[in-house]
Image (spheres, rainbow, N blue to C red):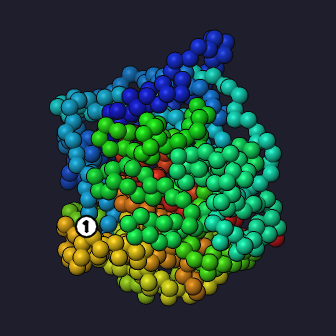
């Protein structure tokens, strides 16, 4: 969790693994890029629990729990794929000093966005006199930039440092960044520019997907269906991988390299299984243990194909067969920046496949130019009402999302607990049933429910649960949905989980949560909250992004630049930046987040990105086609 203290160390580890520090290039091969930065005067605000410090240029804040909340200014540089960064230097101007009367505000621990209880991560005491100890840090990533691959260099500047003993701030007014780098041949062009979209599905679903193939081709996207049997039998490429999930990822990589694909649509959810889950299509579980849970689903695994050195991104850097491991001293070094758009239709039967195919075709043919698409609905409340916190974090997040797209002609309906527009399940169902282009829920959840708190009130207002979502009647006027909360996208839920619980614990399964009580975690429902909304028979949504595990947030004024609330509104920034193909929009929001919050420094930042799953077609044209 020591995000800023260890950032430089982790960066060096990452670079040494890909040869970015120790290079044997001649001086003539090394290029340089510089950027000068001027910082505005400090802004100090005294509040009950200390002094808040910020700058107009602030992009986020230091977030080590127990540390001091100080501004970070991140500058992102992009280079051609496989560029070697040989050095990053930052020279600050002479620092000024100022004594504060109140100590600088201490960083709160992240809080899990659960509907019924909250897990707070523990804080560790600081041992350094000056915080943060270093004046800058940086990290690299290789992934999607629009429709191209790029090497990202994110440089994090700490223009303000704090001496807690002397209660003294030191700050710089200027900085100059100097980057030394070597260009190499980028990833070879695909052998053929043969396909834009590959649909991967079990053989049983293949014929039902043919109309979607024809539709995509009619819209200019060359498309191919590949079955799991095709992958395992080496029909197109020699099979590689230690399990079915790695085999599918290698296939996607080969299709990217040789066919030039931009999107992979995975069709298939859970098929059953009691003691061992069965799936229509492979899944990957992360093994990052944040103290709240030790594993959760991650489809980002299938989108991250390369690391910064151009190597296959295996998510198993220590080669022990445990993927995305981060527990104790065991830690896989991951890139996590996606190369392609990946989304899943978590269909559990053929009826759902046909439903989703029809919806995608209808949406892309009819949404363009419609009045309903220009409606934004924000559903939220006071996410962290405890204490004297005057901020309504969920409402702030939905407002920030709308701010990103307001200039594009959208109108907002804010269903907040503070204005009493969100007052129960019926209010949400009625509003979405009018039709809308986007919905942003920001609050608390579990696989079955979602809701949030009234202002400064520990009571809870429930939205529609996974069964009640079937009451939506917006028909073909289907939104893209963003959901802040825990486990709303946990698409491994199944009635078989109840059978397993009873077989293992008997009737204790239905009792209190400790040591039994798994029934109350709602993992037994037939469909997760997110997939229930996507597959609602008379309405619902066209696509949904939400957490497969515990979501995390930070209470207070800076909630929009930290943790889950930050990632939520970055989707709308990505869309407003011109990314109107859903997989690119989704992928770019992850890139934005990782550029600001190095995913290999902090477990929670790493988890937030891994578990942010897209259930929907990554090749979906947001707002439909004009012709």
Q: Nearer the viewer, residue 213 or 464?
A: 213
Q: Nearer the viewer, residue 356 or 49?
A: 356
Label 1: state its secondary structure. loop
- Residue 37: percent from the left, percent from the top? 51, 31
Q: Nearer the viewer, residue 602 or 88?
A: 602
**On the rendered image, what quadrant is the C terminus found in?**
bottom right
Quadrant in the rendering for residue 389: bottom left
Q: Which residue is at 66% across, 41% downward?
A: 149
Quadrant in the rendering for residue 28: top right
- Residue 87: percent from the left, percent from the top? 52, 21
Q: Which residue is at 59% across, 13% downward?
A: 24
Q: Which residue is mark 1?
A: 117
- Residue 63: percent from the left, percent from the top? 33, 44
Image side of residue 560 versus residue 170, left or right: right
- Tell me the crowding category of disc 1: few under 14, some 14 to 19, or many 20 or more residues within 10 angstroms, Cα based: few
| Residue lying farthest to the left in this orientation | 165
Q: Total marks drawn?
A: 1
> Considering only vertical position in the picture, is 48 above or below 377?
above
Residue 204 visible in this rendered orientation of the protein: yes
Q: Which residue is at 54% across, 74% downward?
A: 348
> Considering only vertical position in the picture, is 467 above or below 111?
below
């Amino acid at each position: 969790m020591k995000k800023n203290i260890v950032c430089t160390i982790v960066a060096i580890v990452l670079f040494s693994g890909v040869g970015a520090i120790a290079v044997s290039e001649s001086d003539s091969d090394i290029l340089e890029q510089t950027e000068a930065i001027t910082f505005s005067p400090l802004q100090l605000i005294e509040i009950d629990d200390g002094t808040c410090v910020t700058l107009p240029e602030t992009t986020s804040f230091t977030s080590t729990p127990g540390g001091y909340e100080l501004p970070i200014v991140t500058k992102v540089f992009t280079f051609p794929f496989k560029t070697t960064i040989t050095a990053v230097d930052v020279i600050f101007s002479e620092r000024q000093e100022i004594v504060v009367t109140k100590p600088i505000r201490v960083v709160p621990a992240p809080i899990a966005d659960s509907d019924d209880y909250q897990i707070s991560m523990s804080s560790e005491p600081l041992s350094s006199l000056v915080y943060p100890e270093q004046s800058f840090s940086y990290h690299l990533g290789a992934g999607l930039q629009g429709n191209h691959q790029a090497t990202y260099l994110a440089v994090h500047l700490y223009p303000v440092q704090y001496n807690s003993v002397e209660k003294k701030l030191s700050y710089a007014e200027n900085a100059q960044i100097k980057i030394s780098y070597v260009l190499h041949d980028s990833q070879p062009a695909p052998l053929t520019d043969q396909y834009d979209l590959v649909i991967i599905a079990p053989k049983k679903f293949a014929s039902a997907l043919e109309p979607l193939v024809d539709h995509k081709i009619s819209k200019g996207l060359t498309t191919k269906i590949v079955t799991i049997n095709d992958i395992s039998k080496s029909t197109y490429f020699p099979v590689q991988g230690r399990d079915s999930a790695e085999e599918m990822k290698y296939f996607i990589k080969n299709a990217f390299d040789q066919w030039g694909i931009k999107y992979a649509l995975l069709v298939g959810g859970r098929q059953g299984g009691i003691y061992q889950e069965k799936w229509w299509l492979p899944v990957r579980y992360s093994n990052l243990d944040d103290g709240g849970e030790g594993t959760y689903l991650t489809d980002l695994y299938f989108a991250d194909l390369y690391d910064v050195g151009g190597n296959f991104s295996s998510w198993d850097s220590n080669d022990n067969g445990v993927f995305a491991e981060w527990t104790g001293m065991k830690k896989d070094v991951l890139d996590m920046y996606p190369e392609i758009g990946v989304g899943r239709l978590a269909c559990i039967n053929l009826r759902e496949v046909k439903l989703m195919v029809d919806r995608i075709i209808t949406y892309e043919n009819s949404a363009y130019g419609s009045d309903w698409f220009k409606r934004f609905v924000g559903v939220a409340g006071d996410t962290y009402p405890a204490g004297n916190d005057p901020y309504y974090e969920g409402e702030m997040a939905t407002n920030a999302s709308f701010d990103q797209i307001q200039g594009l002609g959208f109108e907002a309906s804010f269903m907040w607990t503070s204005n009493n527009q969100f007052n129960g399940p019926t209010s949400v169902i009625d509003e979405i049933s009018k039709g809308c282009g986007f919905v942003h829920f920001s609050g608390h959840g579990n696989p079955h429910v979602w809701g949030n708190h009234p202002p400064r009130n520990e009571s809870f207002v429930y939205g529609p649960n996974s069964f009640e979502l079937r009451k939506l009647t917006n028909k073909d006027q289907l939104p893209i949905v963003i959901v802040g909360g825990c486990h709303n996208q946990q698409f491994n839920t199944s009635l078989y989980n109840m059978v397993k619980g009873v077989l293992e614990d008997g009737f204790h399964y239905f009792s209190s949560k400790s040591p039994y009580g798994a029934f109350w975690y709602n993992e037994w429902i037939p469909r997760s909250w997110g997939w229930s909304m996507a597959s609602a028979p008379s309405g619902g949504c066209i696509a949904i992004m939400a957490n497969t595990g515990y979501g995390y947030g930070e209470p207070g004024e800076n909630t929009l630049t930290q943790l889950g609330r930050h990632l939520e509104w970055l989707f709308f920034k990505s869309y407003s930046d011109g990314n109107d193909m859903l997989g690119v929009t989704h992928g770019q929001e992850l890139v934005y987040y990782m550029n600001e919050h190095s995913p290999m420094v902090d477990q929670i930042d790493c988890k937030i990105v891994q578990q942010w799953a897209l259930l929907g077609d990554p090749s979906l044209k947001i707002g439909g086609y004009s012709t």
